[in-house]
Image (cartoon, rainbow, N blue to C red):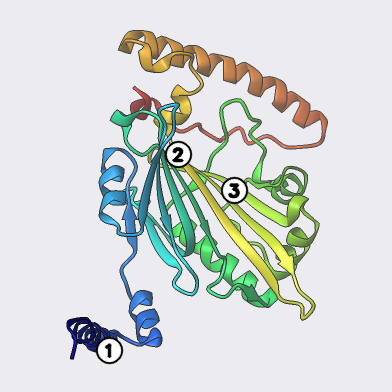
Amino acid sequence: MSTNRICYLTFVLFGLLLCACQPTLDESNKNFAHQPPYSLHFGPQGFKDFAQHQLSRSESHPSGAGFKELDFTPPNLGKIRIENGVNSLLIDHVFSVLGTSFNPDDGIEKLRINSGLNKEEFVTPEQAYQGYVELMKRINQAGWKVYIARYNPRIAKIDNIRYLMESGYVIDPSYIFSYEEWQKIISESVGNSIGYRLYANGILLNLDIDQTKKIEDGKEQYIVRYASETARYNQRNLISDAYKMPPQELEHGFKQEVLRAKKSREIDEKEAIENGYRIDQDYVDPDVWPFVK
């Protein structure tokens, strides 16, 4: 027997043994489903988090921005835990994660996560609603609160549904819509979507629930988009050359931006009142300066 033939047979036998040792597809899916969530932090720790995950990919842009990616392929969708102390948030049915850093010393400053509302791609309206309810319970249990930018009007919660239908954003995340309200909102709102602007412990989160498709049998397809960023990045971006300023100059620039935003809010709130909205005088802007300096 020739040497080449012996090598070939050895290779085939090795391959058969290797396949025999591999779990079946059902076993692989089952094992994947029981894997703990991928933990992701903001800041320098975020770099380490992405680096330790085998699914991670990295890319740099000429502008200096750095991108870290995690991608998951159905049916093995991911589970991500955004680490933020007592406000840490668990996200199921994840397709992809994009972490962004513009200033290497600050580590990960943005996270963009796309996920399904449910485990299945197409679901009945009742299943979609239940997915929404479970998501909002998780958001509220994690302690995330509505965030109103300093330059935006503080619309009162009593005008929650009207504001949502006109702007696309919910101003009372603690209120979970009834099934009837959900159906009306998702079918009549701009883009068939519901949006939330939230804040917790130095992190801002824009959450969008979008109905992307309906098929003939009445089932629906949804995608949930999480766009989060650090308050440090968000607020410094409002101040020209913030990263070049010494501490005292940065504090002055921050205070000036607060005053400018306050004047803008006063104008917008006056206009909102003229349009029949009530203003939430009790809303207090979160103290983000400790995260900015």
281 horizontally vs 47: left or right: right
> Between marks 1 and 2, how big is the CA–CA gap?
48 Å
Under mark 1, the amino acid is Leu
Residue pictured at 31% horizontal, 68% vertical: 36
Which is more N-terminal, label 2 or label 3? 3
How dense is the environment of label 3, judged by Cα within 10 Å: few (below 14), some, or many (20 and up)? many
**Residue 148, x across and y down, in percent:** 57, 35
Decide if residue 177 is in sight here: yes
Which mark, by number, is residue 16?
A: 1
Q: Name above or below for residue 174 compared with residue 287.
A: below
> What kind of element bears circle 2?
strand
How dense is the environment of label 1, judged by Cα within 10 Å: few (below 14), some, or many (20 and up)? few
> Between marks 1 and 3, how big is the CA–CA gap?
52 Å
Q: Which residue is mark 3?
A: 196
Residue pictured at 77% horizontal, 81% vertical: 217
222 horizontally vs 82: left or right: right
Under mark 2, the amino acid is Glu
Q: Would you say the residues marked 3 and 2 are in contact, meaning their CB atoms lie under 8 Å apart? A: no
How dense is the environment of label 2, judged by Cα within 10 Å: few (below 14), some, or many (20 and up)? many
Residue pictured at 52% horizontal, 68% vertical: 134
